[in-house]
Image (cartoon, rainbow, N blue to C red):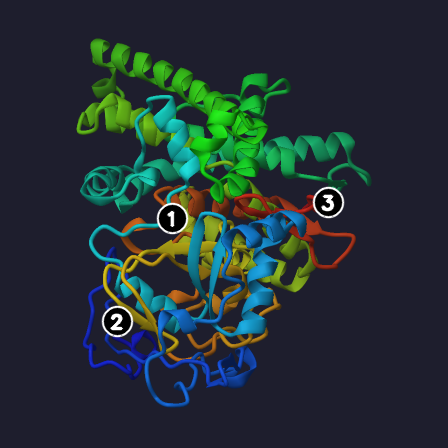
Amino acid sequence: LSVHQMTVCVRTQATCGSTHLLCGVAQQRAFCMMAAGTLAQGKSEGRKGAEGTGVRKRGVDGRVRSFEEIPHTGRSGWINLVKFWREDRFRQLHKHTERTFDALGPIYREHVGTQSSVNIMLPLDIAELFRSEGLHPRRMTLQPWATHRETRQLSKGVFLKNGEEWRADRLLLNKEVMMSAPVRRFLPLLDVVAKDFCQMLQARVEREGKGEEGKRSLTMDPSPDLFRFALEASCHVIYGERIGLFSSSPSLESQKFIWAVERMLATTPPLLYLPPRLMLLVGAPLWTQHASAWDHIFSHAEARIQKGYQRLSSSQARGSEAAAGGQYTGVLGQLMEKGQLSLDLIKANITELMAGGVDTTAVPLQFALFELGRNPEVQERVRKQVRTSWPQAGGDPQRALQGAPLLKGTIKEVLRLYPVGTTVQRYPIKDIVLQNYHIPAGTMVQACLYPLGRSAEVFQEPHRFDPGRWGSSREDGQKGEGAGGFRSLAFGFGARQCVGRRIAENEMQLLLMHILLNFHLSVSSSEDLKTTCTLILQPETPPRITFRKL
């Protein structure tokens, strides 16, 4: 282990030693130090008391503080919920957590409606939380989603499962979407969609742009096209076939699917804090919108799955698969061929992958184009790498990405500043100590990614867009002690990290690569984007980007 992979700390309880972390993350040895903000007459020092250290002093009498002593935002969940509604905090949840950490320090409790959590933001605390996640890590159940599956008598995918049932299904899915062998097989499918997107964009710039022929530029909102790209790319990997969203008349059905995903995401957060069964009984409009959005998502996925199943059955009957030299049949085809998951479970997981694979890539791509446009020097550094790597790769997308690490750094930097999901949750399986406060087993603890990514205690010049900070030298652009692996958590962590991570990461990198090979990007205003939270973080207004043909 390198020095930067060691977490050196002192715990106030004698329960230390080295701990094994799940799922390919380097084992970290820790003499765990959970020091807390100094408390004087019951008040927390807040974050300013120990900037740059990532840790806090002990309580004034040296003892581990009780759970009840953790700073909090108010004891009544229902009063807090009314405040959230009245002050529109749901839409600004990321800013609310940032302000609350500034006011109360690096740990606080919050009770909103039916939900209670302990919120943290420093890497050392996050490392300790993940060391306590157990063999079957749990994150917060999105109860509105679960209620929809239960009332419609639909199977749940891994996103909504827990325990041994979750683990068994997840291990089977990992073989098709997370391991290096399937990634190598589906990368060419993502690459061809990214190339086609750029050809479509080139034709549009030539047709609608200004300037002399061959060097035209066009200023536009690319977000509708990015949503179509994300759906086309994920469908190509999941179903092994194109759905034709780049044609001159893309299907209305696919556009309705995109709208349904957006409506589902927008109606989820308010429902999280209310009992969904009650809303179902009283027929609340919010619940009705949410359930109908999921119904549309499932019907769209069902039609695609049926089509894929028929195609696979007919090809097997003809024996054409062998003749085609084992052509990749998509995630759906692979799962069906192996037959280890029931058809109902395949449908449940494919639908979750589909629903989770559109906004979560299209929105970060909006932010990426904006940041590259307003940071022309960074854009040129990344383009220089890409221009060297792409010809040397000989058409192999995996080699091309490996030769341009700044592409991956760009995605990590975008997700540092604009995390798609603003928190990662776990329920520790044993009592732990965070910031010198006792946290009972089974407490929901949230790692808050927006304040983490913008904290001067964790990153040097946190508001500077610098993909190079994620390079081989882990010191670059990062501050604080140890826990180096717990600064980039946009896809979650360990066994319960995002199951579509490899699809999303490569999809975004390949599109940026082809865009940078073909266009120079610029923006008319370099002012920060205003952001809002549905279930995911997104721009209040999609940024307009100028694409100039190279």
Give x and y (percent) for residue 366.
61, 46
Please, is residue 513 above or below residue 71 in the view? above
* Residue in the picture at 62% in, 33% down: 225
Give x and y (percent) for residue 451.
54, 65
Please, is residue 17 above or below residue 217 in the view? below
* Residue in the picture at 39% in, 86% down: 58
Residue bearing mark 1: 140
Q: Give the camera-side residue of 359 and 210.
A: 359
Question: Is residue 334 shown left or right of residue 543?
Answer: left
**Which image quarter holds the N terminus?**
bottom left
* Residue in the picture at 59% in, 44% down: 515
CB-based contact (under 8 Å), mark 2 and mark 3 = no
Residue bearing mark 3: 544
Give whichever of discs 2 and 1 has the lower sequence position. 2
Callout 2: helix, strand or loop? loop
Please, is residue 170 above or below residue 95 in the view? above
Q: Is residue 195 visible?
A: no
Give whichever of discs 1 and 3 has the lower sequence position. 1
Give x and y (percent) for residue 45.
53, 82
Q: Give the camera-side residue of 2 and 326.
A: 2
Three-letter code, disc 1: Met
Callout 3: helix, strand or loop? loop
Query: For residue 334, which quarter of the picture?
Result: top left
Give whichever of discs 2 and 3 has the lower sequence position. 2
Residue bearing mark 2: 28
